[in-house]
Image (spheres, rainbow, N blue to C red):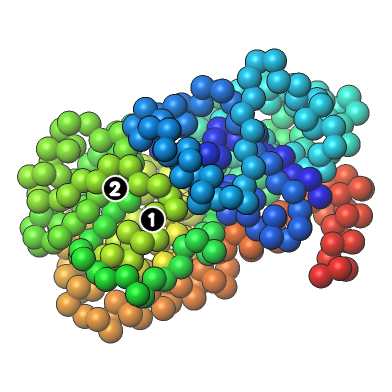
Amino acid sequence: MRFIFYTHSLISDWNHGNAHFLRGVMRDLVRRGHEAIALEPEGAWSRENLIRDQGAAAMTAFHNNFPDLKADIYGPTFDHAAALADADVVVVHEWTDPELVASIGRIRREGGRFTLLFHDTHHRAVSSEEDIAGLDLEDYDGILVFGETLRERYLKAGWGRHVFTWHEAADTSLFKPMPEVEKTGDLIWIGNWGDDERTAEIAEFLVQPAGELQLKTTVRGVRYPEAALASLSRAGIGYGGWIANADAPRAFAQHRVTMHIPRRPYVRNLPGIPTIRVFEALACGIPLISAPWNDAEQLFRPGADFLVARNGEEMKECLRRILADPQLAQELSVSGLERIRARHTCRHRVDELFSVLTLCGTAEVARKLATTEAAE
């Protein structure tokens, strides 16, 4: 089948975590013999910032790292109807321009033979509700959201007829243990500063414990203001700036522990939704400690797959325990990796996507899915 994904960017993961998941999903579709194409707009802020930050070489690196992925850039004169004419499934991400969201819906209504899905992987449905409420989703066959609480929000608000939970996951062809890599540091945190959504949490759970324990710590990410960089420096924490997602597995392998610091809107309003870095870190077999979040959907086994620290002091104690106890570190690594491989890979999510398509897809998509399953 031919899958087309409208995304903010597939090429750039600069402050754009959805690119991680979409790459993994598309790669799995290609491995199964399907065609997958991403369409991203001219002037996408993530891609523009990546080029400004890293130069054109970053674009070349993407194509070298992911030769199996296809991404086309569209502008104002792009013929979307022609591009979708032979599509079987079209998935439109919530960062897509609202007018285009509506236009693709009209193409579907006026004779489009494809199954049309909307994909939401952000907290705007609760933090900026009017943005989502203003989208025209009437002609969409289904909606995919990355958490059950978000699904309930859509249903309660009447945004779409069929809404399905579709969590993010790890691309385990990329994110996997690298035991041959020498460990050169203690703690690594890969995360962007963002819009003051976890400023206090970063200070409490990362900066203070790492500084007091005098750990060899590395932070990677973007959008760190001068005050944040100064606080990292005072704590003796090394800041390495942006890191390509393809390079993250090696960075995890070079360190002995990592952590999850969720953004406040998810903790308060969307329980059960972790950052994709939880899936990716556990897939790499690195011990993980999480600041508080409610695993409402029981995606993981807190205490076994990772440790939970309720405050900065507990984070410091958890760090001390893992770094001093190789057996504990090994147990966490094995358990977390086992959970990912059993339930949270992009292969699992493609299976789930196919299940969604059997429920709300066109008759032609259902026929092709049945043919594919029979062949396998």
x, y (%) of residue 235?
Answer: 9, 49
In the image, 5: left or right of 184? Answer: right
Amino acid at circle 2:
Arg
Amino acid at circle 1:
Ala
Dot 2, how many residues are within 10 Å of its Cα: few (below 14), some (14-19), or many (20+)? many
Callout 1: SS: helix
Residue that carries the numbered disc 1 in the rendered image:
248
x, y (%) of residue 322?
Answer: 23, 73
x, y (%) of residue 317?
Answer: 17, 68
x, y (%) of residue 295?
Answer: 46, 59
Q: CA distance from mark 1 to mark 2?
A: 9 Å
136 vs 218: above or below: above
Q: Are marks 1 and 2 in contact (CB under 8 Å)?
A: yes
In the image, 137: left or right of 312? Answer: right
Residue that carries the numbered disc 2 in the rendered image:
220
Q: Residue at (72%, 29%) from the top-left corner?
A: 137
Q: Quadrant of residue 306?
A: bottom left
